[in-house]
């Protein structure tokens, strides 16, 4: 069986149907998203590769995570109209982990149902030709002399997720590399790539707008941080990797893989183990703190994750105002994101409105 397994189920949705439910029950939109492997320009890579059958091995790597890599390639569009540069994401070829593959596959399918937004990384297409599915028996009961076996499909092989290319890479890396150029003045001309307060506020607003859209599609990110925000050629912030990390946490991958660091500094879920939009709001506050601290690591006074950290969070310990953040931004936007009661935290729609109000020149 090739391609993403098409799930049978409801094909008409109402306003209460989440994007993930549509992806789970709906069929893979192959006609709209499938990209043939030949459209991805691996030729320069093959020519320089000693392992010609593994043509991704020598690709231009522009990013790397705990579960895969991102490569920069050329894509010939379907109608042969033009060649564009894209980012191709795939699972680590050295990672023989069915759970990770399943999570990556689920993330890809969710993206096909998500739609487009200026502040969310756009899915261009998928290459699923090399996926192979195996039917495995994971539970067997003998009931009245009859075998009652439960079966499931597991994927292996290669899956390529083709995304828009964000030229400036992750926001976290950019903040660190450009930290020395920062000026608290907002008078620096927009065509100058030096950092200023207006640019930091703009990124906070853009991320809130992207999260507002994800919420409207009933998608929980699960790992919002500056490392999961990319910048395009105009330095517009775009959210990426939504949903993937949450699925991996739920599958306890971090417990099984000892070399995988748990991003505890951004997660309120470690207190109650519940992923939700409101836990994303908590992470958003941490993300904004990172932006105003120009990529500094949050909770640096806690060298590692301990029960003392959880106890301190429950007892009301919070991050202090970041160095380059106005008091009004901290009091009215960042700090409310970290309220203990989830119901008291602001919604992303409210956060967007406050940013737009507070960042007006008249409110300086």
Image: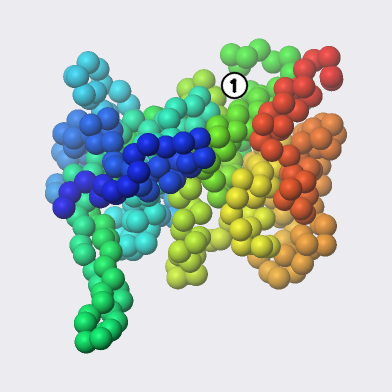
Residue at the spot 46% in from the left edge and 36% down from the top edge? 14
The residue to which callout 1 is attached is 193
Q: Residues within 10 Å of mark 1 (few under 14, many from 20)?
A: some
* Coloring scheme used: rainbow
Q: Circle 1 sits in a helix, a strand or a loop, which is it?
A: loop
Residue at the spot 32% in from the left edge and 62% down from the top edge? 98
Relative placement, left or right, of 74 versus 231 is: left
Count the marks: how many? 1
Relative placement, left or right, of 336 versus 212 is: right
Task: Out of 297 and 230, give the one closest to the viewer.
Answer: 230
Task: Out of 203 and 48, give the one closest to the viewer.
Answer: 203
Residue at the spot 32% in from the left edge and 47% down from the top edge? 9
Q: Find the residue positioned furthest to the front.
A: 144
Residue 109 percent location from the top left of the image: 35, 43
Does residue 10 appear in this view? Answer: yes
Q: Quadrant of residue 317?
A: bottom right
Look at the picture and state if 31 lies above or below 10.
above
Does residue 264 appear in this view? Answer: no
Look at the picture and state if 82 lies above or below 91.
above
Relative placement, left or right, of 55 versus 225 is: left
Task: Out of 282 and 303, give the one closest to the viewer.
Answer: 282
């Amino acid at each position: 069986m090739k391609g993403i397994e098409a799930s049978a189920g409801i094909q008409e949705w109402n306003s209460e149907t989440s994007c993930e439910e549509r992806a789970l029950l709906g069929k893979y939109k192959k006609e709209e998203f499938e990209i043939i492997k030949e459209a991805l320009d691996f030729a320069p890579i093959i020519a320089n590769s000693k392992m010609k059958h593994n043509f991704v091995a020598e690709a231009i790597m522009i990013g790397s995570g705990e579960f895969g890599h991102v490569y920069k390639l050329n894509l010939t569009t379907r109608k042969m109209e033009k060649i564009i540069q894209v980012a191709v994401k795939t699972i680590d070829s050295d990672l023989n982990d069915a759970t990770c593959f399943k999570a990556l596959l689920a993330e890809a399918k969710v993206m096909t149902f998500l739609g487009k937004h200026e502040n969310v990384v756009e899915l261009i297409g998928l290459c699923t030709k090399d996926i192979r599915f195996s039917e495995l028996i994971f539970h067997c009961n003998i009931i009245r002399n009859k075998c009652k076996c439960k079966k499931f499909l597991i994927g292996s092989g290669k899956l390529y997720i083709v995304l828009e290319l964000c030229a400036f890479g992750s926001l976290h890396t950019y903040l660190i590399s450009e930290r020395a150029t920062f000026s608290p003045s907002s008078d620096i001309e927009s065509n100058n790539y030096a950092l200023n307060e207006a640019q930091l506020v703009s990124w906070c607003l853009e991320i809130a707008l992207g999260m507002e859209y994800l919420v409207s599609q009933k998608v929980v990110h699960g790992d919002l941080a500056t490392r999961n925000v990319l910048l395009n050629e105009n330095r517009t912030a775009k959210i990426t990797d939504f949903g993937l990390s949450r699925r991996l946490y739920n599958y306890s991958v971090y417990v099984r893989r000892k070399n995988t660091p748990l991003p505890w500094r951004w997660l309120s879920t470690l207190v109650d183990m519940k992923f939700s939009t409101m836990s994303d709001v908590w992470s958003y506050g941490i993300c904004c703190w990172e932006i105003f601290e120009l990529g500094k690591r949050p909770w640096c006074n806690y060298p590692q994750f301990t029960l003392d950290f959880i106890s301190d969070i429950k007892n009301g310990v919070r991050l202090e105002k970041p160095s380059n953040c106005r008091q009004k931004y901290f009091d009215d936007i960042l700090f409310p994101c970290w309220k203990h009661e989830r119901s008291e935290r602001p919604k992303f729609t409210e956060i967007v409105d406050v940013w737009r109000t507070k960042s007006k020149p008249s409110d300086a």
